[in-house]
């Protein structure tokens, strides 16, 4: 029986959850898991394709179940998709866990995400849409996070160290 994840990373697309998560797992000597990767593996297709073929509500159902399973089964570092916090039951599930919100401003997001059309929610006007997504989600990220780590102008290694420091975790 696991006691839950060591670290749960949340934040917008492009904030570095996957990259920082893998670094944290390596530093902690723990396994890494990404719920977006779980969904892709289970569905046998990319998230953008799920959005196009079946719509966002269907994807959010898949995401809710992927997060529930990962929180129950995984004892290492867990990265959640950017919109996972939209679901109230997911937010409740994260209560009391070591959740870290990786934050960044819109300029950093534009640099990192750019005009990547594989990001279904940013396909038309990325800068405006990212701002709108953040207006809708920022309070949800901060609601469930134990700590907030700024990622602007930091390398993934610096962000990983800041997460370790913030949660007072020691490298393996």
Image: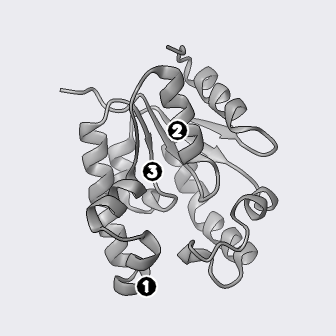
Please indicate whether residue 68 sits to the left or right of residue 5 in the image: left
Q: Residue 63's x, y, as percent?
A: 35, 61
- Residue at coordinates 27% horizontally, 50% vertically from top-left? 68
- Report the residue at 52% width, 37% height from top: 22
Residue of label 3:
80
The crowding category of the residue bearing disc 2, from other C-alpha atoms within 10 Å (few below 14, some 14 to 19, many at least 20), is many
Q: Which residue is mark 1?
A: 52
Most extreme residue toward the front is 44
Q: Viewed as shown, does residue 18 lie left or right of 44?
A: right
Residue shown at the point (54%, 22%) measured from the top left:
27
Front residue of 118 and 4: 118
Q: Quadrant of residue 40?
A: bottom left
Residue 146 seen in this snapshot: no
Q: Is residue 167 above or below residue 38?
A: above
Label located before the other in sequence (1 or 2):
2
Circles 2 and 3: CB atoms closer than 8 Å: no
Other-residue count near label 3 (Cα within 10 Å), few / some / many at <14 / 14–19 / ≥20: many
Say whether disc 3 or disc 1 marks the residue closer to the N-terminus.
Answer: 1
What numbered label is drawn on residue 21? 2
The N terminus lies in quadrant: top left
Colour mapping used in the image:
one colour
Q: Secondary structure at mark 2?
A: helix
């Amino acid at each position: 029986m696991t006691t839950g994840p060591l670290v749960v990373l949340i934040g917008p697309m492009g904030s570095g959850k996957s990259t920082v998560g893998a670094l944290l797992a390596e530093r902690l000597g723990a396994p890494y898991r990404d719920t977006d990767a779980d969904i892709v593996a289970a569905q046998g297709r990319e998230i953008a394709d799920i959005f196009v073929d079946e719509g966002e509500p269907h994807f959010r159902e898949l995401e809710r179940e992927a997060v529930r399973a990962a929180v129950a089964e995984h004892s290492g570092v867990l990265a959640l998709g950017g919109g996972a916090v939209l679901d109230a039951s997911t937010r409740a599930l994260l209560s009391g866990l070591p959740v870290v919100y990786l934050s960044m401003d819109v300029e950093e997001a534009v640099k990192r995400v750019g005009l990547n059309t594989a990001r279904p929610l940013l396909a038309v006007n990325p800068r405006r849409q990212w701002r709108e997504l953040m207006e809708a989600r920022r309070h949800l990220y901060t609601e469930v996070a134990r700590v907030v780590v700024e990622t602007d102008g930091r390398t993934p290694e610096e962000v990983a160290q800041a997460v370790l420091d913030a949660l007072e975790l020691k490298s393996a």
